[in-house]
Image: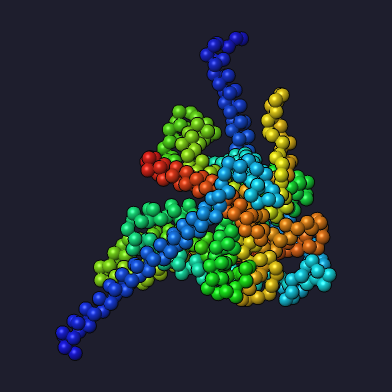
Amino acid sequence: MSLQKIDTKIRADITRRKRLDQWFSLLGLFALIICVLTIVILLVDMCYDGWERLRPEFFSNFPSRHASRAGILSAWVGSALVMLVTFFVSAPLGVATGVWFEEYAPRHWIRHLLEININNLAGIPSIVYGLLALGLFVHTFGLGQSIFTAGLTLSLLVLPVVIVATREAIRSIPTAMREGAYALGASHWQVVWDHVLPYSMPGILTGIILGMSRAIGETAPIITIGALTFIAFLPPAPWTDTWPYMHFEWLNAPFTVMPIQIFNWTSRPEAAFQKNAAAASVVLVTMTLLMNGFSIWLRNRLRKNLKW
Amino acid sequence: MSFSSEQRVVSTRLAKRKMRHVSEKIIETLLFLSAAASILITVGVVYILVRESVLFFQHVSIVDFLTDTQWTPLFDDAHFGIVVLLSGTIVSSLVALGVAIPVGTVVALYLSEFAPSRTRNIIKPTLELLSGIPTVVFGYFALLFITPLLQSVFPELPGFNLLSAGIMMGIMIMPLIVSISEDAIRAVPMNLREGSYAMGATRLQTAIRVVIPASISGITASYILGISRALGETMIVSIAAGMQPNFTWNPIEPAATMTAYIVQVALGDLPHGSIGYQTIFATGLTLMLSTLLFNILGFWMQHKHRERY
C-alpha cells in the first residue's frame, strides 16, 4: 500500500469520525428540544383547555353537579389548611433532626443507622405512606379522615427533603464561625441558635419550600386515607371573635384538596368536567412552579453571594 | 462570715453555669429525640404493612398469592394472584424506562460534553422545575393528550391503556435520570478527557470510550432510582391505564398496577378489617419490598462502587 493511500484512508476516517461527532451533537440537541417542547405543548394545551373556566367564580364556588358552576373553593381552602399542618409538623422536626446530625451527633452506630434510615424513607413510594396513615392514624389512633391526618401524612413524606436541605445548609458554614463564638464563651446551643441557624436559614427555607411544593401536589396518600371527593362546605374557621381568638376544630374536619379535586374531575367522562380539571391543574401547576422557582432562585442567589 | 461582693458575683455565675449545663443537656436530648423519630416512621410502616399482611395470609396461602393468575378479591369466587397486578406494574415501568433511559442518557451526555455552558445553566434548573409538576397533572396529560394522540395513529387503541401511561411516566422520570447522570458524568475528572483529546479522539469518542465507562456506576444508579420511581408511581397509571386488573404483557391493553389497585380500593368504601381491606396492605408490602430492593441497589451503586482516581 502506498503512503498516499494510507494518507487518504486516515483522512477519510477522521472525516467520518468528525461527522459522527456532529451527528451526535445534533441528536442531543434534538432530544433536548423534543423534551422541552413536549412539556411546553402539554402545559399550553392545559392552559388552552382550562382558560374559559379560569374566572373569579371558579375560586369562590364549591364543586357542583353542573360543570360550569363548579369551583375549587373547598379544594384550595383544604389544601391551604393541610399545608399549614404539614409546615408546623415537618419544619421543626426536620430542622431539629438536621441540627442534631450536623452539630451534635457522635460518630456512633446510632448516627449511621439513622442516616441509612432517612435515605430509605426518601425512597418509599408515597402511596405506602398513605397505607401507614390509613392503618395507624385513621384506624389505630382514631384521628379519622381529617385535615390533621392528611397534614401528618404529608409531613412524614416531606421530612427527608427538609432534613437533607438543613444538613447541606449547615455543612456549608465554616468551622471558624463556630470557633469564634466558642472563644467568646458561648455554649454549644448558643453557637447553634445565634450563629449556625441564622446563617443557614436561607438554605433551610429553600428545603422547606421545596418540601411544601411536593406536598401540595401529592395525591396518592390522601386518596388512600379515604378523603372524600365531594365536599361542598368549608371547615370551621380557625379564628373566633372571643378569647382565645382561635380554635382547632378545623383539624378534625373532613376536607378535600386540589389534587383530589383534579383527579375527581379528570376521571369523569363528560368533557365539561375535564375542562374544570384543566383549569384546576393550571392553578396547581402555577403554585408548585412558583414555589419551586422561588426556592431554586433563592439557592442560586445564595451560592453567588455567600463566599466564606 | 460574710461574702465579699466579688465572691458573690462568682458564685452566682457558677450557679448559672450549672443551670446552663442542664438546659444544654435538655436541648440535646430534644434534638436527638426528633432525629430518632424518623426511625419510628420506618417502624410504623413495617409494623402496619406486616400486621395487616399477616391477617391476610391467614386467609390466603402465600403459594396461591404468588402463583394464581387471577386477581378477583372482591368477587364471590375470590382469587388473589399478585402476578396480575405485577404484570401491569412491570409493563408500564418497562415502557417508561424505554422512553426515559435512551432519551435521558443522550440528553445528559449532550448537556455535559457538547452543549455550551449557557445552555446547561438554563436547562438544568428548568428540568428541576419540571420535576415539581404534580403527578396527577401528568395523569391528566396522559389520558386527555397522549391517548388521543396515539389513537389518531392507532385507531384500535382503547381509551385506557398501559402504553400512554408508560410514556407519560417516562417523561416524568426523565428529569431525574438526566439530573443524576449529568452529575455523575460531570464528576469525571477533566484530565481523563484531556488525555483522550490529546490522542486525537473526537468528543463523541471521548464520551463513549472514556467518560461513560468512568461514570457508569452513577449512570446505572440513575436508571435504578428511575425504576424504583416508576414502580411506585400511582396517579398516572390509575388515571390513564384504567383500574381493572388484567393479566397481560401487552402495553396496548388496559390493566391495573399494584398502586392503581390500592387507589381503586381506597376510593370505594371497604369496611376496616375485611379481606378486601387487608389485600391493599399485602399489595403495599409487595410494592415496598420491590422498591426497597432497587433503592438499596441504586444507593450501593452510587456510593460503594464509585471509581477512585
Q: Which of B201 and A206 is in front in this view?
A: A206
Q: Which of B303 and B100 is in front in this view?
A: B100
Give the quadrant of residue A299.
top left
Q: Residue at x 41, y 66 (%)?
A: A31
Q: Can residue B51 be seen in this view?
A: no
The outermost residue toward the right is B76
Report whether B64 appears left or right of A59.
Answer: right
Give the quadrant of residue B71.
bottom right
Q: Check the image and report above or below for B114 versus A71.
A: below
Q: Nearer the viewer, residue A128 or B143?
A: B143
Give the quadrant of residue A100.
top right
Q: Check the image and report above or below for A263 versus B6.
A: below
Q: Check the image and report above or below for B99 versus A242.
A: below
Report whether A251 appears left or right of A114.
Answer: right
Q: Which residue is drawn at 70% across and 69% down?
A: B245
Count of labels shown? 0
Q: Check the image and report above or below for A37 versus A166.
A: below
Quarter occupied by the C terminus of chain B: bottom left
Residue B7 percent across, percent down from the top left: 55, 15
Q: Residue at x 47, y 47 (%)?
A: A293
Residue B218 percent across, percent down from the top left: 46, 63
Q: Residue at x 61, y 9 (%)?
A: B1
Residue B185 percent across, percent down from the top left: 40, 62
Q: Can residue A180 be seen in this view?
A: yes
The outermost residue toward the bottom is A1
Report whether B188 appears left or right of A49.
Answer: left
Residue A251 percent across, percent down from the top left: 71, 39
Q: Which of A218 and A301 is in front in this view?
A: A218
